[in-house]
Amino acid sequence: MAELKTKETQTSVDDFLKKIVDESVRDDCSTISKLMQKITGAEPRMWGPSIVGFGRYHYKYDSGHEGDMCLVGYSPRKPNLALYLTPDPKLLAKLGKHKAAKACIYVRRLKDIDLAVLEELIVHSVSEVKAKYGSM
């Protein structure tokens, strides 16, 4: 089985975030970090080269594929911030300007969305993942 690329690393989150050139993106990342840390109670850790994650859980699929992943996380990508969480359609309808995938929400800037709804989405996601997989 191939080695997982997205795994927890010892890379400094602060060093990673300091490399972000756009100050408004850095500010958005700081806001997201504070929200995710408050909700999970976990310190931020790097997952792979570009995901800032909080908490962790172990998953195992029926196919036998298994690994560890962060409960929630984000990545400052071009041109969007990728938020790794389990979407809830009812909450997404109230979020604001975004795009959604199966386990990811993309937003251009936090000013385009309702932060209270984002907080609800993070709480929902943590609850869903813990209910399905537990946490470590």
Image: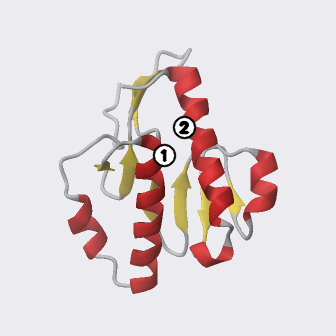
Q: Is residue 14 above or below residue 119?
A: below
Location of residue 112 in the rendering, given as x and y in whole percent from the top left corner: 67, 76
Q: Judging from the image, what secondary structure is the residue with disc 1 in?
A: helix
Residue at 41%, 59% (x, y): give it.
33
Where residue 12 sits in the image (x, y, percent)?
20, 58
Please name whichever residue, 93 or 77, is drawn nearer the observer in this view of the structure. 93
Question: Label 1 vs label 2: CA separation?
Answer: 8 Å
Q: Secondary structure at mark 2?
A: helix
Report whether residue 8 is seen.
Answer: yes
**Quarter of the image with the C terminus in it:** top left
In the picture shown, does residue 19 fall above or below 42?
below
Q: Looking at the picture, how far across and down is residue 105, in whole percent?
A: 62, 56
User: Going by the image, does 37 lie left or right of 130?
Assistant: left
From this viewpoint, is residue 47 visible? Answer: no
> Where the N terminus falls, by quadrant?
top left
Whole-percent x and y of residue 64?
Answer: 47, 15
Give amino acid for label 2. Answer: Val
Q: Which residue is mark 1?
A: 39
Q: Earlier in the sequence, mark 1 or mark 2?
A: 1
User: Mark 1 near mark 2, Cβ–Cβ under 8 Å?
Assistant: yes
> Which residue is denoted by mark 2 in the rendering?
126
Amino acid tagged 1 = Ile
